[in-house]
Amino acid sequence: MSHEIDYKRLRSPPKQRYGLTLFLTLFQVAFIVLFAYKCKSVSFDKEEAPRLYPMFMDVHSMMFVGFGFLMTFLKRYGYGAIGFNFLVAAYVLELSLLVRGLLHSKFGSFTLNIESLLVADFCAAAVLISFGAVIGKASISQLIIMATIEVIVQSFNEYIGLEYLKAYDIGESMYVHVFGAYFGLAVAKVLNNRDLENENESSTYNSDLFSMIGTIFLWIYWPSFNSAVAKDEGQMRAIVNTYLSIASSCITTFIISTLVGKGKLNMVHVQNATLAGGVAVGTMADMAILPSSAMMIGSVAGVVSTLGFEYVTPLLKKIYLHDTCGVNNLHGMPGLISGIGGAIVATFATTQSFTFGEDTNRMYTFYPSRIPIFNSTEYLNRNLNATEYSSGGYGRSGAAQGAYQMAALCLTLIVAIVSGMITGLIMKSPIFEQIKENDEMFDDQSNWITPSDYAYHGKSNDNLEQGTDLKNLRV
């Protein structure tokens, strides 16, 4: 289908836009060369493919359909929301596969499998969350440099948390959601440390409906996100716990939205806070928690997220912290809830609560750092020399494991904020295209060839559909 183009309306792109094409070309060539040199093969496991591929496709759909359409609420930035989400996610997938492969192989050669693709999607989720904080306010060249830096820092942060701190996070609530949210907020603060008022930062009836497509996709597939790489019976627990938690957050979102809206629902709450339960249960999703506990976690997350959109976001605006999509409310605060909850669960975890059938040592599958030290008294008493845990472990107590979980959460928060601020400063460099004028923000016309009716799209007057004012909700 061709568009009728009014070339008189097209703005001349800045010279940095052409530099972006060179930048992307060089990176793509570099990716191909490095993959040819370092990635020698694709590993195959006849049991892994049928088990992981359905989960992979669910998570993959979340990245491109879920996140992409969720951000289409902006009435004049639909192309940018879906198009830039598409480009950034694809770019991150390639870069993440390379960075993660080199990191885990100690910079040697590496192989790829379906789990590698899943982990790359998780990394993409962190970057897309950060994208939500700056959407409409950053140029595509700024988004690419943000993604480049974030992939590297996020990968190293998660590597440290998993390999050295041994802090487990099956649903990536700490390493993806908390990191992505506060990295993006730090970038947003540095990039635009001023009051932003723009009539285009609002929705229309149709743009809100498109955004709900993203919400529904994310809501349906979130159990796959939290359970994709879980082990054994932990995968079933992760599916059930996420299912219950996200359903509970949906219900409490409608309750609180009705109350704060004085009898009316707010679509901003429904598009976002209904998903908070999936984030909040992530860290402990595969652990031995009761279904009722998962429901409580989701219920609290729905309340916190909805109140965040209603009251916290306007407070952030007063300190010139502009959060376009409200990532603090959907990913940041629920992620913190998950990290803290994960530390509590780890503290009180016992071998009895993880017993599966006649196997009383199952806890060590989910907390390997709690395996008793080789040949210690506890090691011998539990007769571990004849089990898969025969090599021994760190011998951590529940309290020690809980402390390490909290240390990983704090480290992630600090690294995200500091690296985000540094990235924001780099993005302000004149070598990258800048969006300084308010009238160029949240507007597709400066980046896309738009159809002739775009001039009237999203414009409201007494005879046209009025858009939802998001200025006190998302900024």
Image (cartoon, grey):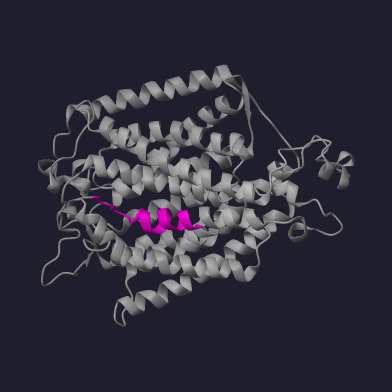
Residue 48 vertical placement versus 249 (above, below): above
Rendered view: 447 above or below 313: above
Tell me if I can see residue 259 in this picture: yes
Instruction: In the displayed orientation, state which residue is furthest to the bottom.
Output: 263
Q: Position of residue 207 (x, y in %)?
A: 30, 61
Q: Is residue 328 within the magenta segment?
A: yes
Viewer-nearest residue: 331 or 117: 331
Rendering coords of residue 144 (x, y %): 34, 34
Quarter of the view holding residue 342: bottom right
Main secondary structure along the magenta-highlighted residues: helix
Q: Residue at x 49, y 70 (%)?
A: 299
Query: What's the magenta region?
Result: 321-337
Q: Quadrant of the C terminus?
A: bottom left
With 427 as the anchor, is 435 left or right in this view? left
Horizontal placement of 456 versus 325: left or right? left
Point 87% across, 46% down: residue: 381
| Percent position of residue 349, x then y | 68, 56
Where is residue 423, by image quadrant?
top left
Residue 398: horizontal and vertical position, in percent? 67, 51
Residue drawn at (22%, 54%) of the image: 76
